[in-house]
Amino acid sequence: MKYHNVISGSWNTKTSLEIARSHPPTAIYKDKLYAFGGGGPKFKSQNTSIVYDPALNSWKYIAPMPSFRSGAIAKTVGDAIYVIGGGFKQDNGTFKFLRTTEIYYPDRDIWEKGPDMIMPHDYPAGALLGGHIYILGGHHPDAVVAGPQTDPGFDFCERLHLATGRWEQIAPLPTPRFALDAEVIDDKIVTLGGVAFTPQGFNNFDHTEVYDPSTGLWQRGSITLPWTAAGMGCCLLHNHLIVFGGYSGDGISDHVAGYDLATQKWSILAPMPGTLAAMGVGVIGNTAYLVGGWADDRREPQSCVYAFNT
């Protein structure tokens, strides 16, 4: 068996997006990467949906989402992709956060309506575990006028029971936040980073919090990120937790690090080809793909597609 060394992973660029976008929810189905909506210029959300075939290094358009939105969560379940939450900027300049679930069927290229969440969640974390889709935190529902700079973050968490199609509230995040990420490790949900306006100011976080579905409780995680990060990309690849870029104290970064789940140690990896945050991430085989996002100006969406190869 070939050994894939995350530490010596390398980067290359792939075919760019025709329409630049930030905050695109992404999912993998049958070794292809799907991206839905996302934020366009001037924070205008999109509903265009696209699929990337790595064998052809090409994108094509698929049926558009019924809703215009960015900052949603996408999870593949069987032959369907659930796209949940997100939001958009309204014509009056305020933001609208959504409770929406829409379900895409790639084999038939069709959409159907899914069950609405209990609360609206924009830019939350999401996870698929044990027959449930978890939606964790996000922008505070009242932060629709001033925007992120005064947003205290949201601690509300809920999960969709896939067998019944019903949402239920679970224990809240210990730290309210948005622009966080989550990965499933050892049958627990590990939330990473994020940001919120606190009494100490606008804070990016470097800590993790872990939810155990067997107890329904949260606890502080043993993993600390190598830098404060919000809007970063994350994935699991060859028993490593990989963290890509994001907002930090020095702005949007090109940093990449891998946490070895066996040794419980971080290694600094090859930096991304450019600074990036608010990107979509998907893993196909031995490669992590980063789609769109924001670069260092924090305003203009990007059309770049980067591949981290191991």
Image (cartoon, helix red, strand yellow):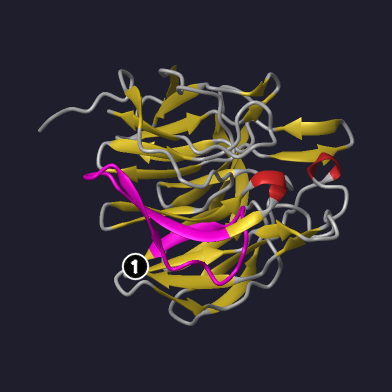
- Give the vertical position of 223 relative to 19 (above or below): above
Q: Total marks drawn?
A: 1
Q: Please say whether residue 307 is visible from this viewpoint.
A: yes
Q: Residues within 10 Å of mark 1 (few under 14, many from 20)?
A: some
Horizontally, residue 38 falls left or right of residue 174, namely: left
Q: Nearer the viewer, residue 40 or 179?
A: 40
Residue 133 position in % (x across, y down): 50, 64
The question of residue 61 being in magenta is answered with: yes
Answer with the quarter of the image where residue 185 lies. Answer: top left
Q: Which residue is mark 1?
A: 106
Residue 224 position in % (x across, y down): 57, 28
Q: Nearer the viewer, residue 107 or 4?
A: 107
Q: Which residues are magenta?
A: 47-76
The residue tagged with tag 1: helix, strand or loop?
A: loop
Horizontally, residue 113 falls left or right of residue 163, namely: right
Q: Amino acid at mark 1?
A: Pro
Q: Residue at x 49, y 31 (%)?
A: 243
Horizontally, residue 268 falls left or right of residue 209, namely: left
Residue 254 position in % (x across, y down): 53, 22
- Quarter containing the C terminus: top left
